[in-house]
Amino acid sequence: MGDGYWRKLLRIDLSTNLVKEESISEDLCKKLLGGVGFGAEILLKEVGPEVHPFDPENRLIFGLGPFQATQIPGSGKWIAVSKSPLTNILCFSVAGGRMGSMLKRAGYDGLIIQGRASKPVYIWIDNDRVEIKDASFLWGKDTVETVDIIRDKLNEPKAAIACIGQAGERLVGIACIVVDKSSFAGRGGLGAVMGSKNLKAVAVKGTKNVEVFDSGKVMSLTREINQKIRTTAPEEFLKGGTTCEVIPTEEFGDLPLRYWAGDTGGIWKEGAKKIGDPYYTQALKVDIKECAKWSCDNCPIRCHRFIHLEEPPEYAVTGIGPQYEALAMLGSCNLVDDLAAISRANDLCNRYGVDCISAGAFVGFATECYERGLLTKKETGGQELKWGDGELLINLVKQIGEREGLGKLFANGIVRAAEAIGGEAKEIAVHVKGMDFPAHDPRAFFSLAVSYATGARGACHTHGLCFKAAQGALLPEMGITEPPDRFEMERKEYIAAKFHDLSALHDSLTMCNFMLFGGMGITDMLNCVNAITGWDWKLEDFLTTAERITTLKRVVNVRYGISRKDDKLPKRVFQPAKEGSRAGKIPIPFEVALDGYYSLRGWDSDGKPTVETLVKYGLTEALKPIWK
Ligand code: SF4
């Protein structure tokens, strides 16, 4: 009888070609579960504040949890963890494809990559056999070509492959890691960390089965939760994936418009109809059978969209189509309502390996800077930057991928670009800790203001699902039993904190947070943990673990220099709209809510976990490096 863990991490040093297995204790598994919990612990111990994200001493961790051994809904995930070149702090980014299950079935609970190869390489893990192979012939290839070539060369058509495109090779600060051509560890430039290590790809085949405590119970829970998700998830979500969110999001005033402009509000009804579902499904000829094929393992929702775009021929795409975040950040944020152009820009992001959220933000930021005269035709290479221009969107995405033209100016992220532009550019940039806002507006859901400001990787929607509470996604086990008023600041720090903790569980068990929308709540997750591990945990144990992981993430960031001064929001968030459903609304008093968040967490007024808090969560080893 097992507990869902191999108790084994694989470490590969690309500077020395060292490959070794390291054991992990049951105590660590109980303390941090896996995924981002393990990743944060490794960064705390091994990557100090002096290590630049592109230094060989930085670590890139592929994190897994106990769920990857099973068919539990949402378990087809893994998480990349590293020090981010975009923010210079902890970063974690969840992706799917087959990587999670393959790496687990190869016999590991995670992979640590360090060092820098002297020439381009890729890693091939075939169960116990690990090879570092030449990848010179792959350098310069896009992510789709890379996957096809490696599978062909290895003669392993089902191998899971996480790779970078040209953006990662060129150390573009918003480069992502692309998995199996269909899923993305998108945020924070972790593709550039791979590029800095001269690592083009990681290919994995695993065929082992890890033992669990009670396989019968795991199977019955799997069936039961699958059934619940299929009957509970909103019909439009099951039919259209996240593309169904565009129209309601516009109605909430939550959709980014004209780079989060302060004065126009949230009105873009006709545009939203032109880019969201149901028009999306029909116009892009979404192939539902292919969507299922290209979605993550063990998923009853299958949100990925497989599209066939034929017209105009120069925009043709057959493959993965834009999801909500891409539609909003490439589309509405730039007032582009041409779905074909957005799909083409999204496809370029996927192929170059670029985070579509930050890419869309960059286009909007550049356009506003141009509009205000901060950028001129001299810097844009003669291009006129204007809102709603699909061709411009495509051109600028190409420039990011190629690291040329304006793409060069933005290659190190929004903060450094704003500094280089000067003037009021810094005031215009919409980010937290260097991470561009994702496609939800804190003026439409006030809990997001606290969540974005205190988010461990900067402004983040995936661990800021708190805005969904106002739409009925509740956490009764954590005391959120009724939908809060979205404009009421009271208790917003509590909601933000609890959803941060939920995210700590999702990202450490390493599962998809969308399962929540199908009613897979904390009790379901806990039941699965107990059936897999046999730990017989009570709810309190589970919730304390979540709080511990959230605290650990903060500890890592405090070590990297983060404090209250960084938990702040851009000016724009405090500019009310003149029209639309959030007219006149801004999330104040923000500082009071921030104090409330710190106090709930056991952090001092500067945002630093107190010694008592560290002791409470058994994180006393953190006392050494930073709490002198
Ligand atoms: S809902 Fe989407 S992201 Fe989540 S596991 Fe399913 S396919 Fe993957």
Image: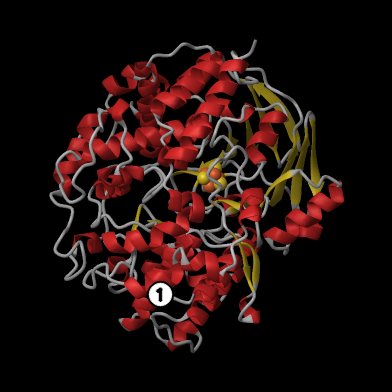
Q: Position of residue 2 (x, y in %)?
A: 63, 13
Camera-side residue: 366 or 467? 467
Q: Position of residue 558 (x, y in %)?
A: 35, 37
Q: Is residue 314 left or right of residue 615?
A: right
- Disc 1 is placed on an element classified as helix
Q: Position of residue 217 (x, y in %)?
A: 56, 17
Q: Position of residue 153 (x, y in %)?
A: 86, 51
Residue 42 shows up from this direction: no
- Residue at x 53% of width, y 64% of height: 281
Residue 156 shows up from this direction: yes
Label 1 CB less than 8 angstroms from ligand 1:
no
Q: Is residue 57 left or right of residue 252?
A: right
Q: Is residue 418 left or right of residue 129?
A: left
Q: Quadrant of residue 214?
A: top right
Q: Which residue is mark 1?
A: 366
Camera-side residue: 238 or 624? 238
**Callout 1: few (<14), some (14-19), or many (20+) C-alpha neighbours within 10 Å?**
many
Tell me how the rendering is colored.
secondary structure
Q: Looking at the image, in which quadrant does ligand 1 appear?
A: top right
Q: Quadrant of the C terminus?
A: top left
- How many tags in the picture? 1
Q: Is residue 334 above or below residue 471?
A: below
Camera-side residue: 354 or 240? 240
Q: Amino acid at mark 1?
A: Ala
Q: Quadrant of the N terminus?
A: top right
